[in-house]
Image: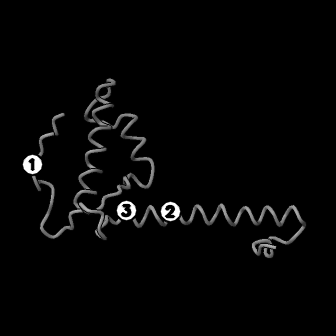
Amino acid sequence: MTLPRSRPNSDYHKNEQPAEARQAEVARDYLKRAARIDELNGHSPRSDGPMVTALKRHNGGRLLVLAMGAFAEMEMSGDVSHICEITAHDLARTHVSYYQHRGALRGTPKALAHSPS
């Protein structure tokens, strides 16, 4: 197995943490690969095809990338925290809706439904 050739530290900036630089590099690479797939399927390289359009449609066109330090130390890209917040909010919404639904079945007002019996 041969590893892809790359220029060491070519995308890293002195004032940027390695995890943040890797996050930006992966996001750029994802868009390049999507554009390449569009091009292979007959779309002009000068315009966004369906793959690039689909990627740009979500989250304001910004890709969320999990990037961590070499030994999973505390250095993480900012997107790690953002993804954790999204997950926590979704789990909380699911949890609250369960208890709201449960209270509605018992005839309990929704305001009181969140306290388990």
How far across and down, in percent of the image, does residue 64 sit? Answer: 38, 55
Contact (Cβ within 8 Å) of mark 3 with mark 1: no
Work out how far the residue at label 3 is from the one at label 1, CA to CA, in angstroms.
25 Å
Please state, as top left, top right, bottom left or bottom right, where the C terminus lies in the image. Answer: bottom right
State the residue position of label 2: 86
How far across and down, in percent of the image, does residue 66 sit? Answer: 35, 57
Q: How crowded is mark 2: few (under 14 residues within 10 Å), some or many (20 or more)?
A: few
State the residue position of label 3: 79
Q: What element carries label 1?
A: loop
Which of marks 3 and 2 precedes in the sequence? 3
What is the count of numbered marks?
3
Q: In this view, does 113 lie above or below 69?
A: below
Q: How crowded is mark 1: few (under 14 residues within 10 Å), some or many (20 or more)?
A: few
**Residue appearing at x 29%, y 25% in the figure:** 40
Which of marks 1 and 3 precedes in the sequence? 1
Name the foreground residue: 79 vs 73.
73
Relative to 90, is 57 on the left or the right?
A: left
Q: What's under tag 1, amino acid-wise?
A: Arg
**Residue appearing at x 44%, y 61% in the figure:** 83
How far across and down, in percent of the image, does residue 39 sit? Answer: 29, 29
Name the foreground residue: 50 vs 46.
50
State the residue position of label 1: 7
Work out how far the residue at label 2 is from the one at label 1, CA to CA, in angstroms.
34 Å
Q: What element carries label 3?
A: helix
Q: What element carries label 2?
A: helix
Q: What's under tag 3, amino acid-wise?
A: Asp
